[in-house]
Image (cartoon, helix red, strand yellow):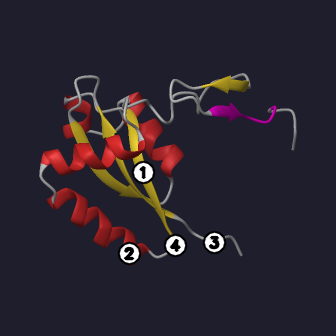
Amino acid sequence: MDEKLYYVYIVASKSRVIYTGITNGLRKRVWQHKSGEMEGFTKQFRCSRLVYFETFHDVRNAIAREKQIKAFRREKKVALIEAENPTWEDLAGNWYESRPLVGLTSSLGVTIRRESRSRN
């Protein structure tokens, strides 16, 4: 049986308007934000860049963490993001590209390795 994972995430606009959410399908949810499928706040303010996320095995813990982050003042949310992602890089920046990228170095100095799509 596949283990279910839950994600608390923060997406931001280029001007750093932020939104915190929860999902059990991070790739799909981020795509919904990027494509404008998510009506409301994130579409209005163009919050489509994944700048932070946490992974949980228990949905109750994920919900509690989402509520905790949403209750933070903006300064604390910014500090949370910048502790892991100081340049607010889009962590999903290359998730939806049609061709594989191998051995690229991100602006954070992290080497990104992806397997070729031809592998099963």
User: Does residue 64 sit above or below 55 in this rendering?
Assistant: below
- Of tags 3 and 2, which is closer to the observer? 2
Tell me which label, 3 or 1, sits earlier in the chain. 3
Reading the image, the residue beneath label 1 is 53
User: Going by the picture, which residue comes out furthest to the left?
Assistant: 73
Crowd band around label 3 with a 10 angstrom C-alpha radius: few (<14), some (14–19), many (20+): few
How far apart, in angstroms, are the residues tagged by discs 2 and 1?
14 Å
CB-based contact (under 8 Å), mark 3 and mark 4:
yes
Amino acid tagged 3: Glu
Mark 3 touches mark 1? (CB < 8 Å): no
Say which element carries label 1: strand
Tell us which disc is closer to us: 3 or 4: 4
**Could you tell me which residue is drawn at 24 percent across and 43 percent down?**
78
Q: What element carries label 2?
A: helix
Q: How crowded is mark 1: few (under 14 residues within 10 Å), some or many (20 or more)?
A: some
Compared across the picture, whether 13 is left or right of 2 comes to left
Tell me: 93 left or right of 63. right
Using the image, determine if residue 92 lies above or below residue 19. Answer: above
Q: In this view, does 91 lie above or below 75?
A: above
C-alpha separation, residue under disc 3 versus residue under disc 2: 15 Å
Q: Residue drawn 38% across and 29% down?
A: 87
Q: What stretch is highlighted in magenta?
A: 111-116
> To which residue does mark 2 refer?
61
Query: Secondary structure beneath disc 3?
Result: loop
How far across and down, in percent of the image, does residue 93 sit? 51, 28
The answer to whether mark 2 and mark 1 are in CB contact below 8 A is: no
Identify the residue at horizontal 50%, vertical 45% (top origin).
Answer: 28
In percent of width and height, residue 61 lies at 38, 75
Q: Residue at x 23, y 48 (%)?
A: 77
- Among the two numbered marks 3 and 2 on one chain, the one whose residue lies closer to the N terminus: 3
Read off the residue under disc 4.
57
Residue 73, magenta (yes or no): no
